[in-house]
Image (tube, rainbow, N blue to C red):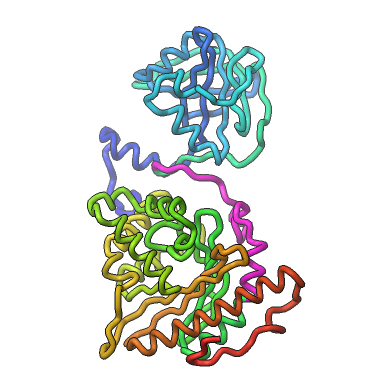
Amino acid sequence: MGESGAGVSPRNGADFREVLGHYPTGVAVVTAIVDEAPVGMVIGSFTSASLDPALVAFLPSRSSATYRKLRRARSFVINVLSADQEGLCRRLSSKEDDESKWSGLGWSPGLSGAPLLDGAVAYVECAFEHSYDAGDHDIVLGKVTDLKVGSGTLPLLFFQGGYGRFASTSLVIPSELDMLGPATMANHARPILEQLSGLFGRDCVAIVKIRNHLVTVASSAGRSGQGLPRYVGRRIPHVPPMGGLFVAWEGDEAIEAWVAGASTRGAANPKLGEMLKDGLERVRVRGYSLALDSPMIGAVEHASDRFRDGQFTPVEERSFRNLLDDLTQAYAELYEPARLPSGRDYQVRLISVPVFGGDGHVEMVLQLWDLADADSELIAECVEALKAAARQLSELLQVERHAGFDSAHDVVEPLGRGSTT
């Protein structure tokens, strides 16, 4: 059974939850009015039971104090939560008292007066029909008295201990990512990346930040010959140590939010936050970011390929975050070295420079990959060429916004090794 081929005991609660956790469920909230106040219980065990008569069922735990309170009501509503209501789900499933949970929460009364939560995907209003003994749970049947579609948006899903949303495999780009602007920037960046790859024989990529992800939107192959399939579409969470350039010039609030994105495992290193901020300070002063090579970075890249393909399960995502965690713990050794003394060679994984928009925000990051056995002079040469490319791209994007161009090739100027223009 499973990947290991070994069975597990159904009497072991942890094994039971792990195996059944491979079956995804929707997330709903059963709401009612008890003692003239709203009550709500988060459930994942909701199903239709009969069409004629119209019956639905859910399976609450007998030990639930909220369930015992709900049983005092004559009617209830099943509120199917939307994908953007994870916060609401966590709030209603917390240990806070009902008054705190419902304070400021948007809802309206259904036909029976039971709460219809604002923003829910759908509502099924019921009268309690019957309950059956099911071990440590009950099977509760509800007779449907009214139902309707609410927001009609994507539902919240629960799978392997994590929350997520449905994504159609027929869509190449997830619908929630607005790719129009980044696609335009990618079109302008590509010829510049090709010049850089030609100069140094290395892979070059362009990265943008879309919501809380870093997405590779353009690439050019150097010696690897794998530029387009290897990189384009790769996306990773914007958490340390990734994407520092996108917050380095954004002020304290953005920096604090980025630093806070490091996993709680980082608490084992109380100096981690200061190391990350020191690194960002060096980035601001120098105008570029540098990471030395490490098997840990390679492991993150390999894992992110599955993230790009949309095949990550919650278990794999937690494993991926652990990889990022390990990389963050090694931040001081691998990222933003204070100095690179001449007279020796370095294994550089990537050099990154920001492309600024007219408002001073970083719109894109250009990266040059895999400088093996590079001395400080070659590194400096690569940095200057990248900076020149970033300035050129920044100017090009500003001109396009003001005048409009059909092709970036019309205005791209040649870059030369050692160029500072």
Residue 121 quadrant? top right
* Residue depicted at x 46% and y 11%: 71
Left or right: 124 as drawn, with respect to 88: right
The reply to whether residue 314 is visible in this rendering is yes
* Residue depicted at x 60% and y 67%: 357
Front-most of residues 297 and 276:
276
407 over 32 or under it: above or below: below
Residue 137 quadrant? top left
The reply to whether residue 307 is visible in this rendering is no
Front-most of residues 315 and 196:
196
Whole-percent x, y for residue 61 in the image: 38, 22
- Does the magenta segment cover residue 79? no
Whole-percent x, y for residue 212 in the image: 50, 54
In the image, which residues are magenta? 161-188
Whole-percent x, y for residue 369 in the image: 43, 79
- Does the magenta segment cover residue 171? yes
382 over 124 or under it: above or below: below
Residue 13 quadrant? top left
